[in-house]
Structures are given as structure tokens and as C-alpha cells.
Amino acid sequence: MNYTHLKVGGPNAEDFVGFSPDSLTAGVNYIRPRFSVRLTAAYQAETKRAEVVVVPGTSAEGFIPQSTYEYQAAYTRYGISAEYALSKTFSLYMNWDDVLAEDRLVYRRAPDTPAFAQTYQRYVSPSYIVFGVKGRF
């Protein structure tokens, strides 16, 4: 298990973007002579991504307040991998990445924006399953 907490300080702390203040990764392995399974989880806290730049003279100038940023919502990914040895030289394996395949949300808000007024985009996050055969010669 690994947990990381980052805190930014100083006079320009609000300008620092693109890092996750909290992240947690964990995994559990079950290993037998011919069979192994690994379960993993990775959590990332809400991440401040980038400031929304308003071009002077455009229609957005009157609607987007100063200090408006995009934030990626917190999310957790789960994974499963397994392997079964058919012989000393051949084995079957399976990797399943992002098992729940939850969509990721990106919010756009200023410090005083109420929750009902925050706009967001939804990114579809697919789940991938890979099956294969390993050979050792």
C-alpha cells in the first residue's frame, strides 16, 4: 500500500495546478504453485487542472469570473490480473483494467460558484480485458 499527501504553500500556491493532493494505491496477491491472482485499487483525489483563460473582447468575458479553474473529480480504479500455469513452459493469463469503468468528471468552477452552477464534462472510461498465453523457452 502507498499513500501520498501533497500540500502546496507560499504566496503563489493558488497558481500551482496539475497535481493530485492525495493518492492511494493498494494491492492484494494470492499466489499458489500453479495459480496467482492480484487485486489492485488506485485512488486519486480531486485534481486542479488548469485555469480557464478568458480572451478579452469575447462573449465569455462577462460570464466566466476570474480564478475559474477546471478540476478533475476524484476517482478510484480497480484491477484484476490472474495467471494459471498449464505446464512449466506455458501459462494462461488475464488482465482486467478499470473493472468498474466509472466515467470521469471534469468540473469548471470559481471559488464562489455554488454546486448547482458548476458545469462539467463526462469522459467515458472504458474497461479493458486482455487474455493471452505466455510461453517460456
Image (cartoon, rainbow, N blue to C red):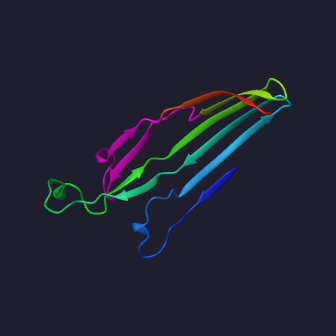
**Span colored in magenta:** 97-125
Closest to the observer: 5 or 87? 87
Q: Residue at x 64, y 48 (%)?
A: 25
Q: Residue at x 37, y 58 (%)?
A: 50
- Rendered view: 16 above or below 52: below
Q: Please tell me in which quadrant of the rendered image residue 18 appears.
A: bottom left
Asked if the magenta segment contains residue 124, the reply would be yes
Q: Please tell me in which quadrant of the rendered image residue 94 appears.
A: top right
Asked if the magenta segment contains residue 43, the reply would be no
Closest to the observer: 135 or 26? 135
- Pinpoint residue 117: horizontal percent, then vertical percent: 28, 47
State the residue lying farthest toward the bottom: 11
Q: Please tell me in which quadrant of the rendered image residue 83 appears.
A: top right
Q: Is residue 12 left or right of residue 64?
A: right
Q: Quadrant of the C terminus?
A: top right
Q: Residue at x 34, y 44 (%)?
A: 120
- Pinpoint residue 76: horizontal percent, then vertical percent: 55, 42
- Pinpoint residue 78: horizontal percent, then vertical percent: 60, 37
Q: Residue at x 49, y 72 (%)?
A: 9
- Pinpoint residue 130: horizontal percent, then vertical percent: 61, 29
- Rendered view: 133 above or below 119: above
Q: Is residue 35 left or right of residue 7?
A: right
